[in-house]
Each structure stands twice: as structure tokens, then as C-alpha cells.
């Protein structure tokens, strides 16, 4: 009987160890999803040819960002050291580098929007995007 109890406890212990992720596992998943959204946005912005294209790309990114907001807020509440975007822990270095790379591309792709800034649909999309970004805490 004792052997059975010990065996069950050992098996339960193994399952607990395997199922317990690291401190930053959730953060890595959320930030990776955020990077995915940014990369998709950059890819769309690189191919814009009209104000309508810009507005659609911005709206699609805003929708993804809005969907990610509760998860991002939770990460920033749980791990406030990540909110600054600086000095990422070693466990998040790969996703941090990925986000840094895509952020640089994002800035250059945004330059393409300058010629469409006066379009009402682009202005509306930019306002919605700014509001969504403010809600994420970025």
C-alpha cells in the first residue's frame, strides 16, 4: 500500500513539475502574439498603394491590438518590470529582440502613410489605433 501511495505521489509530482511553466511563459506567449500582430501590420503597410489600403491595414492592426489588450494589461500588472520595454529578463530576450526588430520596421513603414494623412478614413483609423495603444499601456 505504501509503495502505491509513494508511486502516485511521485507521478503527481512529475505532472506538477511538467505543467508548471516558468515565471515568464505567459508573458512570452502574449508578447509573441503582439510581435505577430506587429509583423503582420508591417507586411501590410509595406504593400499599401492607397489611402483605403492604409486605413484597412491600420484597422486590422487595431483590432488585433484591442483583442490583445486584456492579456497585455495582465502581463504588465503581473510583471510591471516589462512595462518599460527595457531590460527584458533573459527568458524573454528572443521575443524582445524580435519586437525591437519589428518596431524599427514599423517606424519606416509608417512613413508611407504620410502621403495619405489627410484622408478622413486614415485619420479615423489613426485615432482608433492611438486609443487602442493607450489602453494597452504603451
Image: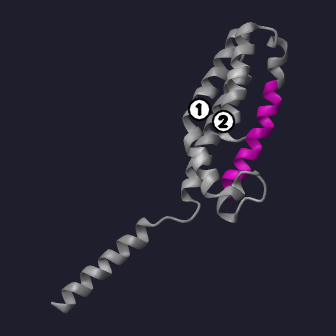
Dot 2 alpha-carbon crowd within 10 angstroms: few under 14, some 14 to 19, many 20 or more: some
Display coloring? one colour
Q: Which residue is mark 2?
A: 135
Snapshot quadrant of residue 129: top right
Circles 1, 2 touching at the beta carbon (< 8 Å): yes
| 68 sits left or right of 81 in the view | left
Give the overall secondary structure of the magenta segment: helix
Q: Which residue is mark 1?
A: 66
Confirm whether the magenta stretch covers residue 101.
yes
Residue 130: percent from left, percent from top: 72, 28
Give the distance between the C-alpha atoms of the residues marked 1 and 2, in whole angstroms.
Answer: 8 Å
Q: Is residue 52 visible?
A: yes
| 58 sits left or right of 3 in the view | right
Confirm whether the magenta stretch covers residue 7.
no
91 above or below 98? below
Residue 98: percent from left, percent from top: 70, 47
Amino acid at each position: 500500500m505504501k509503495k502505491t501511495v509513494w508511486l502516485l505521489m511521485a507521478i503527481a509530482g512529475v505532472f506538477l513539475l511538467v505543467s508548471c511553466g516558468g515565471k515568464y511563459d505567459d508573458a512570452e506567449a502574449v508578447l509573441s502574439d503582439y510581435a505577430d500582430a506587429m509583423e503582420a501590420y508591417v507586411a501590410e503597410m509595406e504593400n499599401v498603394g492607397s489611402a483605403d489600403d492604409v486605413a484597412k491595414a491600420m484597422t486590422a492592426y487595431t483590432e488585433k491590438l484591442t483583442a490583445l489588450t486584456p492579456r497585455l494589461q495582465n502581463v504588465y500588472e503581473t510583471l510591471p518590470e516589462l512595462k518599460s520595454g527595457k531590460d527584458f529578463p533573459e527568458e524573454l530576450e528572443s521575443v524582445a529582440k524580435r519586437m525591437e526588430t519589428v518596431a524599427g520596421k514599423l517606424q519606416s513603414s509608417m512613413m508611407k502613410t504620410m502621403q495619405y494623412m489627410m484622408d478622413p478614413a486614415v485619420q479615423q483609423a489613426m485615432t482608433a489605433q492611438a486609443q487602442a495603444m493607450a489602453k494597452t499601456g504603451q
